[in-house]
Image (cartoon, rainbow, N blue to C red):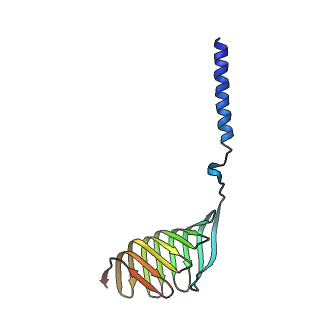
Amino acid sequence: MLRSLLLSILIIFLAFVLKMYVNSFAISSGQEEMVNLLEGVTIKAYSKTGIEWTIRGKGLEVVGKDVKLYEAELFSKEANIKAVQAYIDRSTGKGRLLEGVEVKSENLKAETQTAYLDLKEGRIWGEGEVQILQGDSLVGGRGFEITLKPLKVIINRARMEMK
């Protein structure tokens, strides 16, 4: 009697372990995504307004249609943009810049922690704190929009300091 009970428990346990083993090979959420990590990458992109972007990063991770750049640098004739991380959707050209975002153009330097980016429109915007140095004027505010071609800057809740 005890043998048959132990044998039944052993069969149930083995069935459970075998089911877990088979389930471990199932694709999660029905989709398999390939992740590639590249180092020292340069990419070219073009906007509708005629801006030619050169995009560089120390590391680039590709997941589906999204690109994640580490220590990202985006260069054009109109502006240079730097950020610790950048996420860009390859199909739309829209993305997000994170940590230490710096935008430089001929006579403008803007710094913030988080910004959104549209490469095709040549536009950068955000809702966080921003510091913009233009000539001798330092303008701060919360919320901004910078259009690169033609250069246009809008700062919400602006405060100005003269040097």
Please indicate whether residue 16 sits to the left or right of residue 106 in the image: right
Estimate the x, y position of residue 55 in percent, counting from the top left.
59, 75
Above or below, comparing residue 15 to residue 120 in the picture: above
Q: Is residue 17 above or below residue 127?
A: above
From the viewer's perspective, is residue 36 above or below residue 126? above
Which quadrant is the C terminus positioned in?
bottom left
Q: Residue furthest front?
A: 30
- Rendering quarter of residue 137: bottom left
Quarter of the picture holding the N terminus:
top right
| Residue 97 spot, x, y in % from top left | 50, 70
Residue that sits furthest to the top in the current view: 1
Q: How many badges with numbers are in the image?
A: 0
Q: Nearer the viewer, residue 151 or 37?
A: 151
- For the point 59% across and 74% down, the residue is 56
What is the x, y in percent for residue 36?
A: 65, 61
- Whole-percent x, y for residue 24 in the image: 66, 42
Q: Which residue: 38% across, 79% down?
A: 155
Q: Nearer the viewer, residue 47 or 61?
A: 47
Q: Which residue sits at x=51%, y=77%?
A: 81
